[in-house]
Image (tube, rainbow, N blue to C red):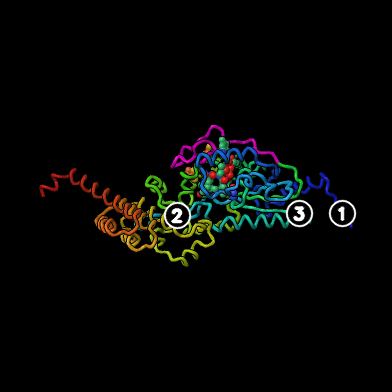
Amino acid sequence: MAEPIRDAAFWSWLKAEMKEAAFGLGIDDIGVASAEPFTELKGRLIQHREQGFESGFEERDLDKRTDPSLLFEQPLSIIAISVAYPSKLPHPPRSEPGARRGILSRSAWGEDYHSVLRNRLQRLEEWLQARVPELRAESMVDTGELSDRAVAERAGIGWSGKNSFIMNRKHGTFIYLAEMITNLPLQPDSPLLDNCGSCTKCIDSCPTGALIGPGQLNAQRCISFVTQTKEMVSEELMRKIGNRLYGCDTCQIVCPVNKGINVTRHPEFQADPEQVKPLLVPLLQLSNREFKERFGTNAASWRGKKPIQRNAVIALGNFREASAVPELVQVLQEDARPVLRGTAAWALGRIGGAEAEAALAQAAEQESDSEARSWAERSLAALRAERAATAVAEPAAAGEM
Ligand code: B12
Ligand code: SF4
Ligand code: SF4
């Protein structure tokens, strides 16, 4: 049998066909980037590290992050894809006094996006393989070495927004990114010429000032990162977490480009409102088995149950939810994890009242972990100071009775 013709016209035909087929394969944006080293990005990543702005979740090896030839033998192109996810929750349950709820960011709605994107890359690979049997491909999403955003930007999927997201007019920012390095000599696409213009809404709305400039993020101050840590959170950031249990969407919600965009065509991303806006109190005593059942296939579960439970305690503190004091006292007295006990001490200090104060006084005496004890002492001191100030402010009323 004659060898199939692999001339420039064939590759150009293949690329056009692939773009036609993408929607049917469950892909929302597709583009091709050259596999040349990302030289400019490397400079940025070095600077980013030197400034202490990394989260620690990034691939450490900056050569691998920026040179596809270190990951794949003779790469000829990188196919970048995006899959859009919903921005709106239909029928969200209400968070009310006595029944306070937390929120998971949209990136944790429905099935874990890593498996969904891997499925799309697998479909794409099968599609290509059927047309080019000699295809070699290496796919990655999020946890791979490459910068998904830099690849997507080069492939023309979107521009790099001031909130640091890759975004476009059709799908906005609520898109997941992934890529496939290949041995196919596909013609690269051009980066988009669009941009944010004079808008600065995301930078102005970031609760912690983590966006230190257009497209530049100090991950250490990003609430999304903070919700995924396992240690005690600083007082300032605990207040700013609000009721976020996982991730943060503020710099996307305020973005005018997202207005009117809500892609719901992927059934995997349909959210269960009770899962993504759960009641807070029942989260405090979740067993490992219950956690696996409720969050096992969710992107928010990758750090285990501890950060989510710690964030639930913080959220109850921020709500000043007095009805949760008995459950928070239970965490303070019985939880095996010092970080949970210390955070409960902070939350009880925020809420106040006689029961909270008595439990804090006991913890200040008996807590064995020095960090948790110091949170109990601080909270207790603050409550006592507050009580003393109220008593001074109302002496006549108290004395005359
Ligand atoms: C580590 C990481 C985080 C960290 C740090 C995020 C960050 N912005 O650096 C934390 C935990 C905070 C995080 C949070 C989130 N993440 Co995240 N994260 C990653 C990961 C694994 C690496 C990112 C990274 O290396 N950052 C370091 C920076 C320096 O590099 P970069 O962003 O890759 O590249 C761009 C920057 O270098 C930028 N840049 C750097 N310096 C400068 C300077 C100037 C002047 C300019 C103009 C640009 C610029 O230009 C590059 C190209 O756009 C990627 C997956 C991957 N493998 O790439 C996902 C990824 C970036 N995350 C993603 C998502 C969805 C989120 C969250 C929305 C989750 C949530 N809801 O909470 C938040 C968003 C926070 C935010 N504002 O970015 C998506 C973003 C999709 C998109 N459309 O852009 C990615 C691509 C995962 C994926 N495959 O879909 N994440
Ligand atoms: S995700 Fe939240 S904390 Fe992080 S940059 Fe955006 S608004 Fe700021
Ligand atoms: S809020 Fe404005 S500046 Fe920020 S990403 Fe959206 S368009 Fe760009």
What x and y, as percent, mark residue 389? 21, 44
Which sits in the foreground, 136 or 372? Answer: 372
Q: Position of residue 324 (x, y in %)?
A: 33, 58
Residue 341 image-quadrant placement: bottom left
Q: Which comes sooner in the sequence, label 2 or label 3?
A: 3
On the question of residue 350 being in view, the answer is: yes
Q: In this view, does 315 lie to the left or right of 392?
A: right
Tell me which segment is drawn in magenta. Answer: 189-217
The answer to whether any part of residue 261 appears in the image is no
Residue assigned mark 1: 3
Residue 324 shown left or right of residue 199 in the figure: left
Q: How far apart are marks 2 and 3 (CA)?
A: 42 Å
Q: What element carries label 1?
A: loop
Nearer to the camera, 188 or 84: 188
- Is disc 2 placed on a helix, strand or loop? loop
**Inter-mark Cα distance, 2 to 1:** 57 Å
Give the Cα separation between the discs numbered 1 and 3.
15 Å
Where ligand 1 lies, by quadrant?
A: top right
Residue situated in front as seen by the camera: 288 or 326: 288
- Badge 3, how many Cα within 10 Å: few under 14, some, many 20+? some
* 298 falls in the magenta region: no
> Could you say which disc has been placed on residue 135 in the image?
3
